Amino acid sequence: MSYIQNWESSLHKIHKALRREIALSLEVIRGSAVFLNRLCGKSNCRCMKGHKHRSLYLSRSLKGKTSMRYIPHKYEDKVVEASGRYRRIQNLLNGLSEATLKKLIAKKDQ
């Protein structure tokens, strides 16, 4: 198998994985799911004794500014899954881009 055929095979595999991931991804969210442990501020709450409240936030960068958005408990699983899907798709696109660039450079050098 030649160098170019090897890269074409690699491109095909990445492209196939990308299509599969997108087809299975009905919900995607750009951002990172971040769990924070916080104090509520009530003087008689258990968090004042060290048992902090754990809550999920979605961290996103928009126009160069990072924002954190609180995610209600009932949506935590969905947000964690959807942000993970976005990251997987982004990683596949980055791999496809790198493989395409290497293929084009290899063709140019021949």
Image (cartoon, grey):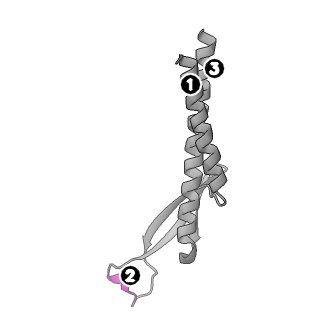
Determine the residue located farthest toward the left in the rendered image. Answer: 49
Question: Which region of the structure is painted magenta?
Answer: 45-49
**Label 1 is placed on what type of residue?**
Trp
Q: CA distance from mark 2 to mark 3?
A: 58 Å
In the image, is 52 to the left or to the right of 107?
left
- Are the residues flagged by discs 3 and 1 in contact, CB closer than 8 Å? no
Q: Position of residue 8 (x, y in %)?
A: 60, 26
- Quadrant in the rendering for residue 68: bottom right
Q: Residues within 10 Å of mark 3 (few under 14, many from 20)?
A: few
Residue position for label 3: 104
Q: What's the residue at 45%, 82% (across, down)?
A: 41
In terms of secondary structure, where does tag 2 sit? helix
Marks 2, 3: nearer the viewer: 3
Q: Residue at x 56, y 25 (%)?
A: 7
> Tag 1, which secondary structure?
helix
Of labels 2 and 3, earlier in sequence is 2
Give the answer, above or below, for where 53 lies relative to 88: below
**Residue mark closest to the camera, 3 vs 1:** 1
Queried whether the magenta region covers residue 47, the answer comes back as yes
Amino acid under disc 3:
Leu
Q: What residue is pinned by disc 1?
A: 7
